[in-house]
Amino acid sequence: MRIEVTVPNLPESVTDATLLDWHKQPGDTVQKSETLVDLETEKVILEVPVPDNGVLQEIRHVKGDVVGSGELLAVIETEARPAVAEASVPEAMPAKPEPAAMPEAARRPVRFAQPMGPSVRRLLIEHNLDPAQIRGTGREGRLTKQDVLDFLDSQKRKSAEALAPERKPQPEPSEKPAVRGAEGRGERRVPMTRLRARIAERMIEAQHTTATLTTFNEVNMQKIFDLRNQHRARFEQEYKIKLGFMSFFVKAAVEGLRRFPIINASIDGNEIVHHDYYDIGIAVSTDRGLVVPILRDADRLDFAEIEKAIIDFSQKARDGKLSFEDLSGGTFTITNGGIFGSMLSTPILNPPQSAILGMHVIKDRPVVEAGQIVIRPMIYLALSYDHRIIDGREAVTFLFTLKELLEDPVRLLLKI
C-alpha cells in the first residue's frame, strides 16, 4: 500500500519550514514511529515520524528545500522489499537530459550492486563512473552524493596539476616572505539557521519598534544562600530535585507583576493589553541559538514545580525536542547571563512583551551593614522595559520590590 508522508500542520505564526536532513534514503526499510526527516522552523526542529512499516520509495524534496503545511515529502510502500535496483528520482530534482554524445552503453538502464540514493545514481551514470572506485562514507559504507562530488573534484584537481606549468622558483633568502599569503587565513561561509535568522530579525524588530530603557539594582543573596543551605537536603529528599536560584526569581517576579500589572502588559496597535495571568519565559541557550520556553501560570507553581519545569525545558532544548506550545506566548521573560560569567548587561525585549529581567553572576563583594563592612554574595539585576507604556517610576519600583523580596525570601511565602 502506498502511503504519502506530508509536512505536519504548522501554527499560524509559522508559514513554512526548511528541510534539514533525511534520516533514510530511497530503498531503505523504515519502521513505524522512527524519525524519517527533520524540518527546521524559526522556532523549533520538527521530527516527522514514519507512519507505518515499509520501504521508502521516493523523496520529493532535498535538504534545504522550503516546504509548507501539507506538502508531500515522501512516499512509503508498506508491501515493498528493500530496493537494490534504481529508486525513483525526486520530482524536486528531475534528471538532466543525457548528452547526445553519451555512449550507447551509458544510456542503457544501469543497476548497481549496492543501494544508493537517486542523486548518487544519476551522477554515476552521467559521468560514467564505477562505484567500486569511490570510497563511501555513508551508513554501512553506502555512497553519498557528496562522496561522488568529492571524487569528481579530486579527478579535476589531478588533471589540472598534470597540465599546470612548472612552479616559480622560491624567493631568495634575502627576500621577505609574503605575510598575507600565509596558511591558516582561510574563510568559511555557512548559511544562518532558521532559528538564528529569526533571532536576528526579532532583535532588530525590538530595537526599531520599542522605546527601550534599562534600570539596574543589586541584591544581597545571603538570606537565600542560608535558606537553601538549611533546607537543601530535605528539599532534594522530598522532591528528588535540587533547589536552585531560579525558582526564587520566578516567585519574586510573579509577586512584582501582581503589584505592578503594567509590567505584565503589552501593546497591540493603539491598545494596551493587560494580562491577568503570569506566563514567564525562561531564556535557554542552545547550540542553535537562544530559545525562550514558557512557564505557564507560574503563579500556581510551587518551588519544586518551577525547578522541575526549568530542568525539563533545558533538557528538551538541548535535544531539540521543544514544541511550538513550549515556545508560544509569554508575558514576561527572565534571562540569566550569569551562568556564563556576565557581570552586567542590558537585555533586549522579547516582543510583544514590555519588560525583561536580566540576572548576572553572583560574586562575593564588600557591602556595608549596620555601619560595618562585610562580605556578601551579591548579584546585579537589570530590567529593560518599553518606555512607551512603562514609566521610569514603575520600572524602578518594580525592580526595587524584587530586591526586597529576594533579600528577605520569607516574604515570598507570606506575600508581604
Image (cartoon, rainbow, N blue to C red):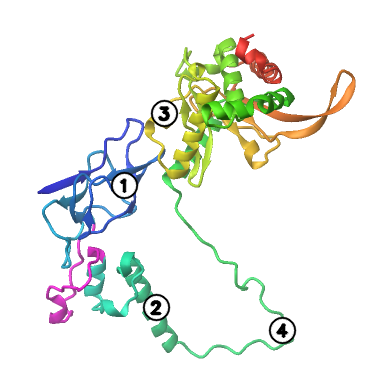
The image position of residue 305, as x and y in percent, is 50, 25
Q: Mark 3 points at which residue?
A: 328
**Who is closer to the viewer here, 264 or 267?**
264
Label 4 CA crowd tier, 10 Å (few <14, some 14–19, many 20+)? few
Q: Name the residue under label 2.
A: 154
Label 2 CA crowd tier, 10 Å (few <14, some 14–19, many 20+)? few
**Who is closer to the viewer here, 193 or 51?**
51
Residue located 58% across and 14% down the image? 255
Q: What residue type is labelled 4?
A: Glu
Range covered by the magenta-colored residues? 93-119
Q: What residue type is labelled 2?
A: Ser
Q: Which amino acid does label 3 sit on?
A: Ser
Residue 175's tag is 4
Q: Mark 1 points at which residue?
A: 66
Q: Is residue 9 above or below residue 153?
A: above
Residue contact between numbered discs 3 and 2, judged by CB atoms under 8 Å: no
The image position of residue 179, as x and y in percent, is 67, 73
